[in-house]
């Protein structure tokens, strides 16, 4: 599993857990994050859950990256979720109605359950 400047990927219960190592998702971070996820996602059958616990800011490029990853997962008959989002990030997801596109879980255990 990949461990880079921006992510640490782990396979837990056959789900790719992506631990973001950045406090923001802007245009600079999105390409490497999407690429790192795409490299490891096949090992989980494209069941991906992103840990947003350290993320404090998501730019429009970061939202686009989440939508891209979600689309890739669905195209490969997988699932996508985010978890441990701060109240501000959770509110952004709600306002943009992204919770209708992908699952949002309060913690890792519920995210794993949501994408299995």
Image (spheres, rainbow, N blue to C red):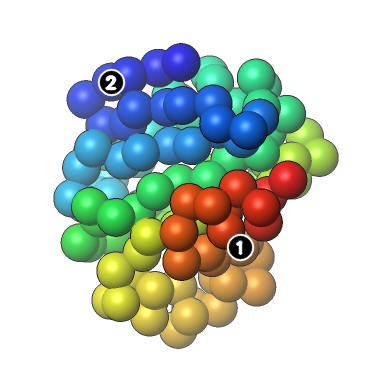
Residue depicted at 21% across the width and 25% down the height: 5
| Residue under label 1 | 103
**Which quadrant does the C terminus fall into?**
top right
Answer above or below: position of 49 versus 85: above
Answer above or below: position of 73 versus 55: above
Identify the element where label 2 is drawn. Answer: loop
Q: Nearer the viewer, residue 41 or 34?
A: 41
Identify the disc placed on residue 31.
none
Left or right placement of residue 78 versus residue 53 in this view = right
Q: Position of residue 112 (x, y in %)?
A: 60, 48
| Residue under label 2 | 4
Identify the element where label 1 is drawn. Answer: strand
Q: Label 1 crowding class (10 Å Cα cut-off): few <14, some 14-19, many 20+?
A: some
Q: Residue furthest right?
A: 77
Residue depicted at 62% across the width and 61% down the height: 102
Q: Position of residue 71 (x, y in %)?
A: 66, 47
Left or right placement of residue 44 versus residue 7 in this view = right
Q: Is residue 108 visible?
A: yes
Q: Position of residue 26 (x, y in %)?
A: 25, 49
Answer above or below: position of 29 versus 92: above
Residue depicted at 45% across the width and 46% down the height: 50
Residue depicted at 46% across the width and 66% down the height: 106
Q: Give how far apart the Cα atoms at labels 2 and 1 are.
A: 25 Å
Q: Are marks 2 and 1 in contact (CB under 8 Å)?
A: no
Q: Position of residue 40 (x, y in %)?
A: 54, 21
Q: Label 2 crowding class (10 Å Cα cut-off): few <14, some 14-19, many 20+?
A: few
């Amino acid at each position: 599993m990949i461990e880079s400047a921006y992510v640490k990927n782990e396979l837990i219960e056959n789900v790719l857990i992506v631990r973001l190592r950045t406090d923001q998702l802007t245009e600079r971070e999105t390409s490497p994050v999407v690429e790192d996820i795409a490299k490891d996602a096949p090992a989980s059958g494209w069941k991906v859950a992103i840990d947003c616990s350290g993320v404090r800011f998501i730019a429009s490029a970061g939202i686009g990256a989440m939508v891209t990853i979600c689309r890739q997962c669905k195209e490969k008959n997988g699932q996508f979720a985010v978890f441990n989002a701060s109240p501000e990030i959770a509110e952004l997801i709600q306002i943009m109605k992204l919770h209708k596109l992908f699952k949002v879980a309060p913690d890792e255990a519920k995210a794993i359950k949501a994408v299995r």
